[in-house]
Amino acid sequence: MKKLFAMLLVVAMVLSLAACGSSNSASTTGGDTAATNNDASTTTPADSATTDSGAAIKLGGTGPLTGGAAIYGMAAKHGAEIAVDEINALGGIQFELKYEDDAHDAEKAVNAYNTLKDWGMQISLGSVTSTPAAATSAKNFEDRIFALTPSASSTAVIEGKDNVYQMCFTDPNQGSASAQYIFEQKLATKVAIIWKNDDVYSKGIHDTFISKAGELGLEVVSDTTFTSDSQTDFSVQLTEAQKDGADLVFLPIYYDAASLILTQASTKGYAPKFFGVDGMDGILTVEGFDASLAEGVMLLTPFSADATDDLTVNFVGKYNDAYGETPNQFAADAYDCIYAIYNACTAAGVTSAMSAEVTNDLMIAQFTSMTFDGLTGDGVTWDASGAVSKSPKGMIIENGAYVGMD
Amino acid sequence: MTMKIKKMSKYTRRNFITYVMLAILFVVVQALVSTGNVSSLIKGQLVPICAYVVMAISLNLTVGVLGELSLGHAGFMSVGAFSGVVMATCLQTVVPIAWLRLAIAIITGGVFAAMVGVIVGIPVLRLKGDYLAIVTLAFGEIIKSIINNLYIGLDSGGLHMSLLTDKLNLAEGGKTILGGPMGATGVSSISTFTMGMILIVVCLTVIFNLVNSKSGRAVMALRDNRIAAESVGINVTKYKLMAFVISASMAGMAGTLFAMNYSTVVASKFDFNTSILVLVFVVLGGLGNMRGSIIAAAALTILPELLRQFQDYRMLAYAIVLILVMLATNNPTLSAAFRRFFGSFRRKKPTSDAKGGAAQ
């Protein structure tokens, strides 16, 4: 009898969940239209992506919408949604955007990619994070579907694939740029590195940072690691950095672990300069993190939310209205992705009637020749390998906001 | 034909039905694929399903037949995956035929996993019950950690290997096969559904024959009562280790098949969660019930993808469906109803053994 009762309860849960599921999808579309309506001066509801499905170019992307890396997937999705709504409001070429969850896992990313392929994706936004992107980009290459990934920065993503392009720097690029920046700005004489040795992203940056630092004569006094299983306690790493007298700690890691490092360093009374890369972006929005601890943290990122140019102000305003937070670099990269694709489609005359394969060839021709101005840089170009060329900006956190360092 | 089936022993008949089920499945899927009636999603999942099925039946050998709880099965999968990938990359130019290269890689994966199985098994199988489960869990983590710090490269001078840091010093034109935390990238994906099905059938045959052999009965005697088994002269270490190593080797082969389906594979994929996932297949399918494992592995691999409409609540829905199924299969009222239904069914058609029983 008890078991029967338990089963009844589970059935009730499933049913309520089904209700959740549908209401959730309703609220998402609601959010979309809300985002469109924020732009009410130019948009009518008829312009929203859903009604145009017949004639719209289908864009698909996979990203971690759930799980530990969800903040990146959600940011990229939101940034892309804003751009799609703006473009659809213009009239001309119409886009229809769909993001599928890959939970930061290569196997699930391939499943998500195949779901999008079944849906009829014409141009792909690749994957948001590196490991899944390495798997989906191989599929992109095989199926001849053009991909422009907003933020998958590993070189494995583009290596040997002529139709996969990146909107962000590659990892090695970030590492050497950081070393160069620290050296040129004379930020420190003794550097400590704390990095995550089971993460592609962290390792890529660490390795090039070390070799570049060696070239420049920047002294690395402490080089310590952690893994995803041990990213709660950093006392050993911090003690070592402190003991060796490091006056700058380089953190080529994601913001979640970085927030713990900052908290634990402050409890220990150790206050070096902290320098991060684009994964540090997002640290101010960590729940339960005392944002004042992040004061003075420096990071190298191509996007700053407090820039005063029209494009950034417009984007940040819309993002804030729609999602109630300041966009990070992932959102900006995804926003730029959509516009880069839009420019290429306009120039090449891509229509929704074209097959993915035809579109693919047109896009490759465009991307190797065009120059793009966006949120994350002016005069952005791509080479035939798919890597982007743009310059990073140094940022410092002051009064709870990113401020340009130069 | 009917007469023949009737004359077969109960076990033979049950196994025969499993083979027929697989054969029908294979023919149907192949027909659907060749006529283009299968979505890319399902097509992309065919090989992973085969790999998970092999994982499930191999773990069922340890958990169901040997009766020892292993929580580190993904570790063997990992060993098989990476040794298979290294082998396949080395043979890239030597063996141009893809299926042959895959077959060699799978065998390599199986051999390496078996070797690790021996190394792990000798100390671990001295323990029993909860202690054994915890130690296998630890071994799974150790394997993951080692592979996360292992660098293997290939150049004209042969294979290079280093631990902890990338000290491969590859010659011009060399290629890093395994780059520590970056895992293996640029793997040529040569796994096919046909190869996956062949692997399932081979593993099933081995397990069925083992279970019905003298050794298999010894293993099951150990499971049911160790002291009694020992008292009649059954060598505990020998039979335990045999079942464990066969299980590990099959997991290794499944790992190679899985890895060769993706262009990238990282060690952190084969973590504790993967071990538990496979254990869920086994428990859901029924301990010792191979056909149940096959069905559970296939169904639970597809399920999360079919639940995509739940969006953010997808994994929650998955968990609830899982609880529901577990409760339903263990509910005495329901299973009595099932038995009545299939019982009457069976009396009319004695050849049909559709239910198969939750456990043997």
Image (cartoon, coloured by chain):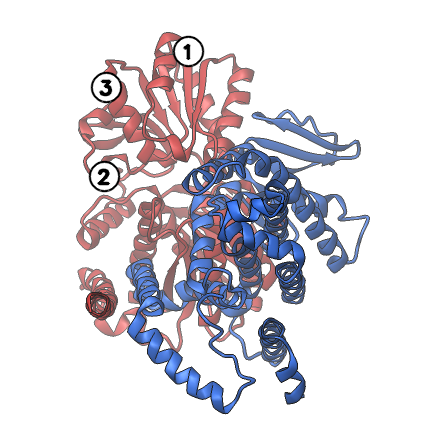
Extreme residue toward the bottom, this view: B348
Evaluate whether label 2 is on the same chain as label 3: yes
Extreme residue toward the front, this view: B231
Which secondary structure, mark 1? strand
Q: Is residue A371 visible?
A: no
Q: Mark 1 to mark 3: distance in Å?
A: 19 Å
Q: Quadrant of residue B183?
A: top right
Give the residue type that dot 1 points to.
Lys
Q: Give the numbered dot on residue A266.
A: 3
| Quarter of the rendering occupied by the N terminus of chain B | bottom right
Give the residue type that dot 2 points to.
Thr
Q: Nearer the viewer, residue B204 or B13?
A: B13
Residue A331 in percent (x, y) is at 33, 48
Residue in view at x 42 percent, y 65 percent = B305
Q: Give the numbered dot on residue A285.
A: 2
Q: Quadrant of residue B50?
A: bottom right
Q: Colour of chain B?
A: blue
Chain ID for label 2?
A
Q: Give the numbered dot on residue A190.
A: 1
Q: Is residue A230 left or right of residue A353?
A: left
Q: Nearer the viewer, residue A402 or B56?
A: B56
Residue B345 in percent (x, y) is at 45, 87
